[in-house]
Image (cartoon, rainbow, N blue to C red):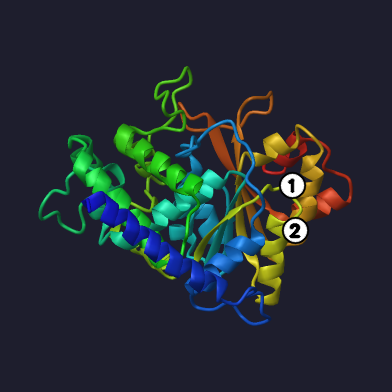
Amino acid sequence: MTHSRRLWLGFSFAALLALVAIYNSPRSQFAGQSLPEKLSDSEFWSVINECSEPGGYFRSDNFVSNESTFQRVIPELYARTRPGGIYLGVGPDQNFTYIAAMHPKFAFIVDIRRQNLLEHLMYKALFEMSDNRADFLSKLFARPLPPRLPADTSAEKLFEIFNNEETDPALAKQSLAAIHQSLLRHSFVPLLDDSKSIEYVYNSFVSAGPDIRYSFPNQYAWRRFPSYAELMLEADENGENHSYLASEANFQTIKKMESENRIVPIVGDFAGEKALRSVGKYLKVHHASVTAFYTSNVEFYLFQTDDWRKFFNNVAELPVDEGSVFLRAYFNNYDLKFPTVAGARSITLVDNIPGLLSAFDSGRIRTYLDVVRRSMP
């Protein structure tokens, strides 16, 4: 029997055992008690399955963010929010930077694309498998890990090192197999299409390396997007880098939350009938409230139809308090312009959730710009 055949049979047997475990686990974890310190694997998958909707379409793979200034609101978040709440977000790994800064008890990432859920599961495995930032980057991009790197090596130095390393195909195969094994240990039994999607996402990072961009595989589109490395080296208005790779402490914060199943990816349309409302129900019965909801620029697309009304009605079902905030990206595509960093295409805005819901209920929200104007200085 060939090695690859034995490996496949091993995966299949592990998948069968995991599937049995899932079917024998309790069906609903929406119990009326405070949020636990961590979720078991069965609780983790139960929340994902009970909150998720069928996958939808977006025009881009969106492997990484195209918002280069999203860190600039972090000092304001420190002033306006508290740790230990609930973080909601959308999209890929820019959420990790907000999570590392805000220290929520749990985070829920809601995205219309199932591929985003699978990308987050890939990240989950990589965080759990990696001892430190350098180990993480080595596995993510399948580039050799330099020996004896100090733990306090700067993010700038890390990316300088890995930018100069060549991709190792053997390391890529090894890391991809380890990702699948890690997810199997968490009782994740992927469908064939899921396995192919995880492989597709991972191989995209391996192919492009730290230079991967929102527009991949067209790395240099007519509008140049920031690379993964550039996003990790951004800073706030005071010049401080808060990215989840800026320090070993930030990295370990995300690693711990991933290991405890406290970053929960969900497939859902912001205007859908299930995802956000199910998250709201889960939080209410566990006596938890949303501290921050990062929406990127999803509202721009919702206002192209009547879906924005459905979205705000869904947000009204989330438990919030007077300090709960939206974080939204606004691209300066209209006459309404915000001052931003030279060369940046967008700005991140902070808005009070109860205040917006009040404006919506009273009919003061009619257009996308009505929402954006709320953050005008």
Q: Nearer the viewer, residue 197 or 149?
A: 197
Seen in the image, is 203 located left or right of residue 327?
left
Q: Residue 103: percent from the left, percent from the top?
A: 47, 65
For the N terminus, give its image quadrant. Answer: bottom left
Q: Identify residue for label 2.
A: 354
Across the whole image, how many numbered discs are drawn on residues? 2
Q: Which of 245 and 108 is in front in this view?
A: 108
Write down the quadrant of residue 172 in the picture: top left
Q: What residue type is labelled 1?
A: Ala
Asked if one can make out residue 261 in the rendered structure from this viewpoint, the answer is: no
Report how far apart the C-alphas of labels 1 and 2 lie in the structure: 18 Å
Write down the quadrant of residue 308 in the picture: top right
In this rendering, is residue 369 above or below 273? above
Name the element at disc 2: helix
Seen in the image, is 259 located left or right of residue 262?
left
Q: Which amino acid does label 2 sit on?
A: Pro
Name the element at disc 1: loop
Q: Residue furthest front?
A: 1
Seen in the image, is 225 located left or right of residue 313?
left
Q: Which of 337 and 106 is in front in this view?
A: 106
Q: Residue 346: percent from the left, percent from the top?
A: 55, 33
Residue lying at 65% horizontally and 64% vertically, measured from the top left: 50
Asked if one can make out residue 99 in the rendered structure from this viewpoint, the answer is: yes
Circle 2 crowding by C-alpha within 10 Å: few under 14, some 14–19, many from 20: some
Q: Residue 79: percent from the left, percent from the top?
A: 54, 60
